[in-house]
Image (tube, rainbow, N blue to C red):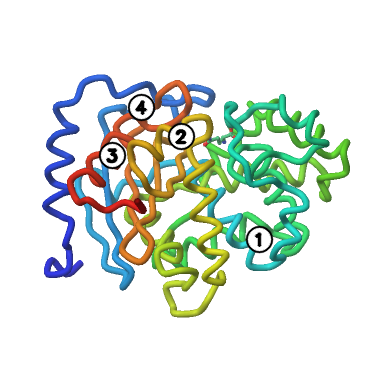
Amino acid sequence: TTTSSATFLPVLERIAEEISHTPGRGRPADYIPALAARDPRSFGMAVAEPDGTVYGVGDWREPFSAQSITKVFTLALDLAREGDELWEHVGREPSGNPFNSLVQLEYENGIPRNPFINAGALVVTDRLQTRTGDAAGELLDFLRAESGNPALDFDTEVAASETAHGDRNAALAHFMASYGNIDNDIPVLLDQYFRQCSIAASCADLALATGFLARHGIRADGSRLLSRSQAKQVNAIMLTCGTYDAAGNFAYRVGLPGKSGVGGGIIAVVPGRCTLCVWSPGLDERGNSVAGVAALDRFTTLTGLSIF
Ligand code: GLN
């Protein structure tokens, strides 16, 4: 970390100070014990610059459960491999329904609305699994490389809890399989999906790993993962679908492509400029971090940076 290019550090410090005085942080996800046990007062925020400089405030180095944030990376990895054929199997429209909802699948013949609700992510993971034989391993390698942190790993306790409480995701997978939209055996797919969700990473790790979306598709080592157009597509889907049935409000308040997870993390992209990751475990009723959304709202307000 070179302080000379830590342009936004004073803004992050101001936001952390403001958040520390804000009551009402929401409640940690309680569908598995490992998430319910996290302290809702935890707060961390990191910014990564396109050159790999990263800095932050609060608990920005503390690992947390990445959960649905990983859906961005599996989408990018699969899109890089198969291109537009993916869109025959998953849509690109906001769902307006909860992230684990089943209801739209029946009307849309087993094609999920978008890659960032659970149904859509299951399809993407299924397709990446068919192409690589180890979707979760592919994802972990990518996150390690982009973050420069070889210690990143699955959290086996979280993955086991997800499996033990996995009836809803199993139902989504079976339902889509009945329409021919799942390739792999369901237990194999679910194991891959739950391990993907379980990856533990910090704000620093995830801000760095998101960098390719600020660099228009270019990875940390300078190689290209996505075309410029594909990077735009992923950013656009984050804006419209990344925070589930609150994506409209997130776009209104923050004005950036973003993706949340029920571990309390949110990643966000300022294309061409920087990436952010904020973490605080208390969630609102839609499954988005209360302090996380508030902090990103303040960031774009204070800096004037947004895509608008
Ligand atoms: N593991 C969670 C699930 O599949 C991920 C959901 C989320 O982060 N929104 O239900």
Dot placed on the residue nearer the N-terminal end, 4 or 2: 2
Q: Is mark 1 within 8 Å of ligand 1?
A: no
Residue that badge 4 annotates: 282
> How many residues crowd around disc 3 within 10 Å: few (fewer than 14), some, or many (20 or more)?
many
Dot placed on the residue nearer the N-terminal end, 1 or 2: 1
Q: Is there a contact, CB below 8 Å, between mark 4 and mark 2?
A: no
Q: Amino acid at mark 1?
A: Asp
Closer to the eye: label 3 or 2: 2
Dot placed on the residue nearer the N-terminal end, 3 or 2: 2
Dot placed on the residue nearer the N-terminal end, 1 or 4: 1
Residue that badge 3 annotates: 297
Q: CA distance from mark 1 to mark 4?
A: 31 Å
Q: CA distance from mark 4 to mark 3?
A: 16 Å
> How many residues crowd around disc 4 within 10 Å: few (fewer than 14), some, or many (20 or more)?
many
Q: Quadrant of the N terminus?
A: bottom left
The residue furthest bottom is 222
Question: Where is residue 240 shown, x and y percent of the image?
Answer: 51, 43
Q: Secondary structure at mark 4?
A: loop
Q: Amino acid at mark 2?
A: Gly
Dot placed on the residue nearer the N-terminal end, 4 or 3: 4
Residue that badge 2 annotates: 248
Closer to the eye: label 1 or 3: 3
Dot placed on the residue nearer the N-terminal end, 1 or 3: 1
Question: Where is residue 129 shown, x and y percent of the image?
Answer: 73, 56
Using the rendered view, name the quadrant where residue 99 is placed: top right
Question: Where is residue 223 shown, x and y percent of the image?
Answer: 50, 79
Q: CA distance from mark 1 to mark 3?
A: 30 Å
Q: Amino acid at mark 3?
A: Asp
Residue that badge 1 annotates: 78
Residue at image point 60% right, 55% down: 74
Residue at image point 17% right, 41% down: 15
> How many residues crowd around disc 2 within 10 Å: few (fewer than 14), some, or many (20 or more)?
some
